[in-house]
Amino acid sequence: MAWDGNPETPGIRNIGRTAEFTRPAEAELASRIDWPDDALMVAIVARDEHAFAVLYDRYVDLVYSASFRVLADAQLAEDASQDVFVRLWQRPETFIAERGRFLSWLMSCTRNRAVDELRARGRRRKREGGPLGEPDEGAQPVFSTEPVDPLHSAQLHEEQAIVRGALAALPRDQQVCLELAYFGGLTQQEIATRLHEPLGTIKTRIRLGMQKLRRALEQKV
């Protein structure tokens, strides 16, 4: 069985809107359920719908959570999440394992898609507030309407660069845990489940990562 277009199924959150996809039986997924992300992506490149279903189930909640934290709108977050997985199915070869972990790549794609939607929403509101329409007084502004302080802006960008640099310098396992906790919005138990690691291991990684991050920031600030 193969898709003719994008995958779609009641069991998968309306991931595409142009084709029918019958979700594989659980027995058909069992052989792939423990595959690592990289192996699933290799299979998806070969158009393996079972591998896609496993990867979708593994990360759909995380992708939705990350999208919602940026967009603060359930429907927009749903749409953004769909787009992330549709693009993953359409162009799985854009993930290159040698450049980093799949989860970091997926979260980067998710944040980029959510930010694109945020900017598009800002442009739509700007157009609606022009001569042809009045702005929605109850809507919250997407961007601050306060005058920009150049000195404060420069300082903020510098601090953000320091944090990003310090985070990138952490051991990979600690970095992933912190990203899931603070960007993905997962609890420590959810991270342990997601990474198939003991809860105690996750707690240790987050604690050590925070200690190293704090020391690195103290040295740079």
Image (cartoon, rainbow, N blue to C red):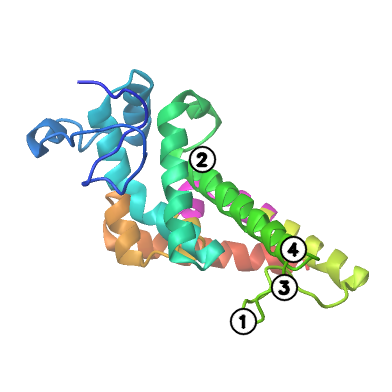
- Amino acid on which the number 3 mark rests in the picture: Glu
* Vertical side of 174 occupied by 39: above or below: above
| Circle on res. 126 | 4
Residues at marks 3 and 4 touching, judged by CB atoms closer than 8 Å: no
Relative side of 15 to 185, left or right: left
- What is the distance, in whole Å, between disc 1 and disc 4 at their CAs? 15 Å
- What is the distance, in whole Å, between disc 2 and disc 3 at their CAs? 40 Å
- What is the distance, in whole Å, between disc 3 and disc 4 at their CAs? 10 Å
Can residue 41 be found in the magenta stretch? no
- Can residue 66 be seen here? The reply is no
Residue 17: image location, x then y, percent: 36, 39
- Amino acid on which the number 4 mark rests in the picture: Lys
Quadrant housing the C terminus:
bottom right
Q: Which comes before the other along the chain, label 1 or label 4? A: 4
Kindly state the secondary structure of the residue where label 1 is placed: loop
Can residue 173 be found in the magenta stretch? yes
Residue under numbered circle 3: 134
Q: Which residues are magenta?
A: 165-176
Q: Nearest the camera: 70 or 215?
A: 70
Residues at marks 3 and 1 touching, judged by CB atoms closer than 8 Å: no
Badge 2, how many Cα within 10 Å: few under 14, some, many 20+?
some
Residue under numbered circle 1: 138
Badge 1, how many Cα within 10 Å: few under 14, some, many 20+?
few
Relative side of 163 to 37, left or right: right
Residue 82: image location, x then y, percent: 41, 46
**In which image quadrant can residue 188 be found?**
bottom left
Quadrant housing the N terminus:
top left
* Vertical side of 185 occupied by 176: above or below: above
